[in-house]
Image (cartoon, helix red, strand yellow):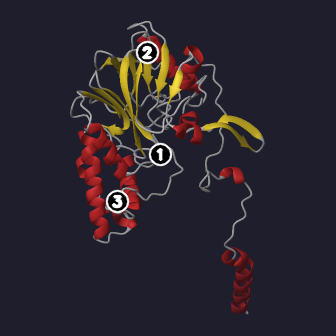
Amino acid sequence: MKIKLILLFSILAFVLSMPFIFNKSVTITDPHKLDADDNFIINEWVEARESAAPDWNYNLKPVQVSDRVWCFFGALEMPTKENAGDMSNSCYIKGDDSWIAWDSGPSYKFAEQAYAAMIKIANLPVKTVIVSHEHDDHWLGNNYYKEVHGAKILGPKSINVNYYGPKDVNGTKYPGMQTRMIKTLYQDALRKTELVPVDESFEDTTNFTLSGVNMEYVRVGYAHSEEDWFLYLPDDKVVLVADVVMNGRVTSNRDGIVIGQIEALRAIKSRDWNHLVPGHGFITDKTAADESVQYFDLTKTRVLQAIEDGVAADDITKTVTLEEFRDKDLYYLLSPGNVFRAYEELEMYDPDSDEPVVAKKAKKED
Ligand SMILES: [Zn+2]
């Protein structure tokens, strides 16, 4: 009797689960939770944390890199409430009658305080902001320069395409995508920060002179992110490269590709410079790019070798560990992810083709 009952229940359970087993089509009830590639967007909108606390003091100190270039160097960390997003590098270039900002940092307050520090060096307005790539630790200060200085923002198209609103969520209009930084930081740091679109984008590498400073804005394409650019100042022999180079810490290649990174590093090397400012890290001399060159060369060689040896995706982070970088910041947090991502990319790598085969990623990292 007991066995018969169990059997009966089993059959009943099977019949009840049939629609789930056999019906593979899923009805999407919340289409706003899909991005352009039909991936689910798992993050929900978080209400802003209201706070009466005084503005966060970033305590910014500009470091002079060359005659005309000063930079602010951020912590070698992920963005946290403790560092208030001050974990990337941004620079100011001194023109004849204005400052040119290279990346604007993680918030309006950061940009406001950076400018307050810079006018002690020269009391000039910021007429242009040039942005390296779409990751939000590099451009959330843009609206400060736009609103207070009326600056023109030059940057990658991908910012306008991937971030700029208004977004309609269940009938409520939001000014733009709620980025990682906006979810992480407290109001005392985030106050007044709003996403503003880039005013002008370029299709390819472009030379221009701003306030008497000659510049080459170099398109490197899909490397660390969907669309990376670096800024070369030929008369100053300075190159501002943002996240295609990091030192002192391991990079985050979750949105990037190894082959694109190696190409970007080659393009940087082909310019004549004495100082290079990375997106993260404090080394700015002629050795500044060495760690990144080694990291991506080793990743490519070792992951390709492992694929040839038949190592499965599941085992790749145990096989390729990049021991040389164990002492660098964020190694344990980011390096396994970079190796896994490289495996996904290089599995489809064809050395005879210039076109890297990679699925576009939905996630946006630093
Ligand atoms: Zn980045």
Sequence-wise, the earlier of marks 3 and 1 is 1
Q: Nearer the viewer, residue 133 or 128?
A: 128
Q: Please name the amino acid that badge 3 sits on.
A: Thr
Nearest the viewer among 339 and 135 is 135
Q: CA distance from mark 1 to mark 2?
A: 28 Å
- Is residue 56 something that shows in the picture? no
User: How far apart in space, not on screen, are marks 3 and 2 (Cα)?
Assistant: 45 Å
Quarter assignment of residue 279: top left
Give the total number of marks visible in the rendering: 3
Residue identified by numbered label 2: 99
Crowd tier of the residue under label 1, counting other residues whose Cα lies within 10 Å: few below 14, some 14–19, many 20 or above = many
> In what quadrant of the picture does the N terminus appear?
bottom right
177 left or right of 9?
left
Give SS at disc 3. Answer: helix
Q: Residues within 10 Å of mark 2 (few under 14, many from 20)?
A: many
Whether tag 1 and tag 2 are in contact, CB under 8 A, the answer is no
Under circle 2, the secondary element is strand
On-image quarter of the C terminus: top left
Q: Quadrant of ligand 1?
A: top left
Q: Position of residue 89 (x, y in %)?
A: 39, 28
Question: Viewer-proximal residue, 184 or 366?
Answer: 366
Mark drawn on residue 1:
none
Which three-letter amino acid code belongs to the residue tagged 1?
Glu
- Decide: is 241 above or below 23: above
Q: Looking at the image, can residue 16 be seen? A: yes
Q: Which mark is residue 226?
A: 1
Residue that label 3 marks: 317
Decide which of 181, 11 is in the foreground and name it: 181
Is residue 226 shown left or right of residue 177? left
